[in-house]
Image: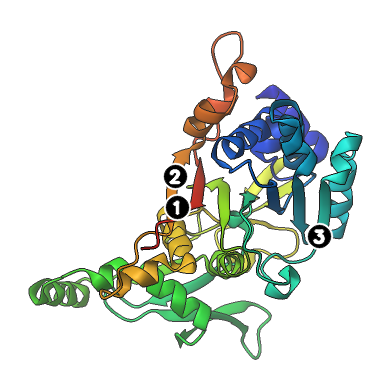
Amino acid sequence: MKYLDNIYKQNDIAWFTPVELFKPWYAHGIAESIMRTANLSVPLKIYEIGGGSGTCAKGILDYIMLNAPTRVYNNMTYISVEISPSLAEIQRQTVGEVRTHLSKFRVECRDAADQSGWGDVDQQPCWVIMLEVLDNLPHDLIYSENQVSPWMEVWVGKKHDRETHSELFKPLQDSLITRCVEIMDWEKDHSNQSGSVSMARSIWSKVFPKPRRCWLPTGCLRLLEVLHGVLPKMSLIASDFSYLPDVRIPGERAPLVSTKKNGSSLDYGSYLDAKGDADIFFPTDFWLLERIDHYCSGQLKMHKDNSSKQGKKRRTITLDTSSFMEEFGLPTKTRTKDGYNPLLDDFKNTKFYLSVPTHNIK
């Protein structure tokens, strides 16, 4: 903890990702999970979205070079989709520390959620890695007056004679928000709830009205719609925060909004107060992530259609980071003398989500 405290003060950034703190072992665990699951008879193709400083890319390329058959390493392609030009250059430098990696690695400087940047649909199997990407994607806020009132969009605007921002509530009209609400409420809308239960809920909401606020991962929905559209046979590995401590902002899946000054963090009580250099982290609802993934792949739509004979198109699993690393990583490499293992014992609020296509569409 003293070591962590020192490097945070020296770098004056909000936080280091686990793949940076536990290099190279964190990336090696991800590489092992790919090697165990991938069809190595076809050239291995890996996309990483938001690759940071290139630590994950280099770690995976190192591991495959040392542990996979030579032909797998020689024929593989690793593509980093990075929106930041400065980070893209850092990634090239990091991966280039091993000269043979450069012929397998390239950076495409673009927005992964923009479909035009992907070109034609690629029907070949591939892997997509997203580490701590979902917590920074755009979210939309919706509001309801009570437990049964319809959801409304929350807009932010300035009042005529004031500099401060305030919230405005409007009926749902944004198609991305509407789709996200439908996915979130799908199980509730398709359950065989009796009329008496619905009436009881309605009465209860009038007697004890409770306003609701909910943050929707619309950026995640948009990104997965694009990915499933252009890479229909992709396998997905995503890691992120399942919950965030000390969140002061109200609402389901509310973000932690903080700023870093002189090595210490200051958390905001309202997202409206955050201006300039604030960091915004959203927790990932992994149950909802799985729903969105199935919706974007077509699986959830199939289940809505009772006449369809089609089955599941994807196999999915959510694992605690410690369970993932115990299965695929090398925990002995990060165990301290007294048995404490930061790779397994810290970051208890993070999970891995794995989603792979199946051939079962009959």
Q: Which residue is mark 1?
A: 286
State the mark number for residue 318.
Answer: 2
Amino acid at circle 1: Phe
Q: Which residue is mark 3?
A: 108
212 sits left or right of 1 in the view: left
Mark positioned earlier in the residue sequence (1 or 3): 3
Q: CA distance from mark 3 to mark 2?
A: 29 Å
Mark positioned earlier in the residue sequence (1 or 2): 1
Residue 50 visible: yes
List x then y, in percent, for residue 187. 29, 66
Contact between marks 1 and 3 (CB within 8 A): the answer is no
Q: Which class describes the residues within 10 Å of circle 3: few (<14), some (14-19), or many (20+)?
A: some
State the mark number for residue 149.
Answer: none
List x then y, in percent, for residue 254. 49, 59
Amino acid at circle 2: Thr
Q: Nearer the viewer, residue 83 or 262?
A: 83
